[in-house]
Amino acid sequence: MPVEVYMFGTVFIWYNVSILMTNAVALIYFIPVFHRLQLNSVYEYLELRFHPVIRKITSVMGMMNTMFYLGLTVYIPSLALSAVTPMSLYITIAITSATCTFYTTVGGMKAVIWTDVFQFLIMIVGMLSILFKGILVVGGFDIILSAAERGQRNNFLTFDPDPRIRSSAWSITFGFFFITCYETVCNQMFIQRWLSCPTIKNSRIAVGVSIIPVICLAMISIGNGIVMYAYYEDCDPLLSKNIFKIDQIMPRFAVDLFHDTPGMAGLFVAAAFCGTLSTVSSGINALSSLLVMDFILPKFPNLTAGRKLLISKTASLFFGGLVMLLAYFLSLSQSNVMQAVSSIIGFFGGPILGLFTIGILMPWIDYKGSFGGLLLGLACTGWIGISAMVYSADTATALPLSTQACNITTLTNTTLDKVITIYNTTLYTETTGTSSPNLFNTIYSISPFLYGALGFTMALVGAHVTSIFTGFSNPRNAEEKLFVPLIDSEIFPEKMRIFFRFGVPPYQATKSDKNDKPSEVKKMFCATEQRTGRGTSNKH
């Protein structure tokens, strides 16, 4: 996020609003259903609600999304380490991937949780060190704010509703709402954490408390981005060829700040690594869990706990190697990392989130409608995303960058008219004519942060259009434990609450629900940690 703020301004402060919206949705709608069912895999819900084929398709999509995401998160700190050490990028990628895979495979979920705690503390210390040192070096808040005004970075009140504007209050708030919503409520990485809590109440508390560190990190990142711009206001390191990728600007900033303080640049690299280690370790654990629960146990339901443990560890090693290869592949790209991550999640996450929303809130849609919605959502996001890459659609207007104070002769004061950042290339060019199709300046130019919202919307539309032809289900025949009413609070009139049940009978909690029996995922994690031979068979 500091790079995004450096390039596009403080409009990213609206990311915090999307986080609040996401957590509210998770608390009210998704956590009660998932905790009630005690799912082994988050995609198991789609089998219970729709069809086993839907579960397998979305599970593959989710795993592909997670692997690309983890590849990008490995690439980021590897790039930082290669920028401040003599090691090449390929070596740092191998070290990062191997470290994450090792302690995830050997230590299981317990190792992941404990390392997350320490890594978060190191991240906070590293980021705060850069923020405070940067403020002192630049000269204080007044100078920083003045630089932000001159560079047009103080743009958090940009409310233009045009979806082609890459970074506006609307595209950040609603675009990241769908992205973070998918990551929070439809992703095995997060769901396995919420289900590890003993009760629904505890899960809700965990989700609520998690808002605090996320928003704190976001605000520190925004602060670092603005301070970084004030520091490089008259000598952008990319244009002056001091770095070769824009994502290297943050480690470069740390080196410039702490060049006379031994160890501090290393602290920043450690902070960057901690964020990645935390994410990758959880992701590898989630991938191995999805493979076992969605593809192996349905075929071999009587595997012993020891066999499941062995398969899980082998899968962790396999996915760790695959993530390393993807990181190598992505290192060939010149794209902005945050945009690439958001686009990839939007491709897969938007339609998947649409399916879960249909399942929980729309009892009149059956598996035929859901399949139609999934296909339409994927088709739309794929069409627009690929077309944007092919035609290099302009999705952003860059803010001013300067090299007037640089000690170089090849560059002069430069104001960028455009930044074209599409997955496999980042180009800084002047405005030129194009022979692209008419859609070039319309739908192909939609902000990549809105791909998730587009996929979600098209999934809902596709599900209803398909159901017009295949028939709607009768909500009265629905299995009530798979649904959550849109409005079910006692502060609303009873007639309104009945209406928003859409005919689904009220759910009556059973004794087993209140006891919150552990799922297969919990048992597998327990076996990983305790190395016991006790286990249960999969219920499917």
Image: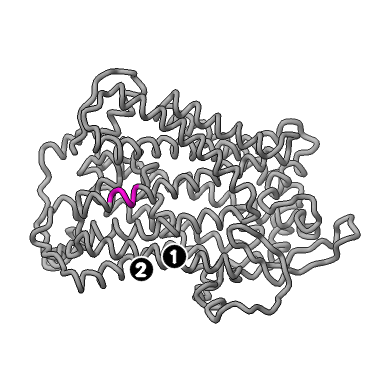
x then y, percent, for residue 434: 65, 78
Relative vertical location of residue 249 with respect to residue 38 in this rendering, above or below: below
Q: Residue furthest bottom?
A: 438
x then y, percent, for residue 37: 20, 43
Magenta-span inclusion, residue 123: no
Residue at which label 1 appears: 381
Magenta portion: prevailing SS class: helix
Label 1 secondary element = helix
Q: Left or right: where does residue 102 sit relative to residue 29? A: right
Relative vertical location of residue 483 with respect to residue 80 in this rendering, above or below: below
Q: Residue furthest right?
A: 409
Kind of residue at badge 1: Thr
Q: Left or right: where does residue 398 sit relative to residue 528? A: right
Residue drawn at (35%, 38%) of the image: 291
- Report the magenta residues as a range: 55-59
Residue at which label 2 appears: 458
